[in-house]
Amino acid sequence: MTDSGQIESGQIESGQIELTGRSLHPGRADAPLIQLEQPLSFWGGVDAAGTVVEARHPQYGIRLAGAVVAMPTGRGSSSSTAVLAELIRAGTAPAGLLLAERDTILVTGALVAAEIYGRWMPIVELSDSDFSRLATGRAVALTAGLAPSPVQVRVDSCTDTPERIRS
């Protein structure tokens, strides 16, 4: 275990790695991974279908709905809370979020969706070293308990490709 309370990652079987993070919001996800190169604001950066519409974002046009999305952190606005909660309600949100840095705005959106709509989306904070091991197109399985409990994140090979995820 590290000084921050996180369990270190390890190899679990050929072609599969297990990373350990800290739960920021409970939930379960098993979906293809999309790794964003830059932070993203859900307010104005993602449309109602869950597609990146921020023209200057490197992953413009990528559909995030149903995928586990890894990104360094969110990028403002506090209105992203309401947008994320609505995406979760509508079924067009990411299946889960893996973050390199805690983001209270995104966690609040997930909390609101769980409380009002009874829909859960896991959010997990990974260490920088584990976050750097992620790659788009791989399958990810995670079950996050109540914050701040440790979470195992399994990353495997995946048949989905980034092109299939494009809208």
Image (tube, helix red, strand yellow):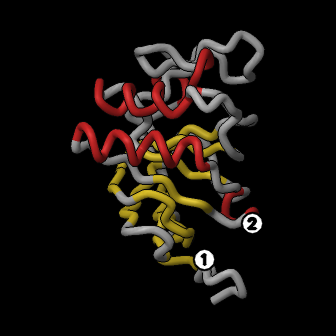
Q: How would you rate the neighbour count of disc 2 (Cα within 10 Å): few for under 14, some for 14-19, many for 20 or more?
A: few
Q: State the image coordinates of residue 114 (x, y, percent, origin top left).
A: 30, 46
Under mark 2, the amino acid is: Ser
Marks 2,1: beta carbons within 8 A? yes
Question: Does 51 sit left or right of 75 as displayed?
Answer: left
Which residue lies under the disc numbered 1? 9
| Label 1: how many Cα within 10 Å (few below 14, some 14–19, many 20+) | some
Q: Is residue 141 left or right of residue 55?
A: left
- Taking the spot 40% from the left edge, 60% from the top edge, the residue there is 142
Compute the Cα span from label 2 to label 1. Answer: 9 Å
User: Which label was assigned to residue 130?
Assistant: none
Farthest residue, direction left: 118
Image spot of residue 143 (x, y percent): 36, 63
Residue at 63% of width from left, 49% of height from top?
103
Residue occupying image coordinates x 37% and y 47%: 121
**Image location (x, y in percent) of residue 85:** 40, 33
Q: Name the residue under label 2.
A: 129
* Screen quadrant of the N terminus: bottom right
Residue 32 is left or right of residue 102, and the answer is: left
> Looking at the image, is 60 positioned above or below residue 95?
above
Q: Is mark 1 on a helix, strand or loop?
A: loop
Q: Image point 63% across, 40% down: which residue?
A: 35
Q: Which quadrant would residue 37 be assigned to in this image?
A: top right
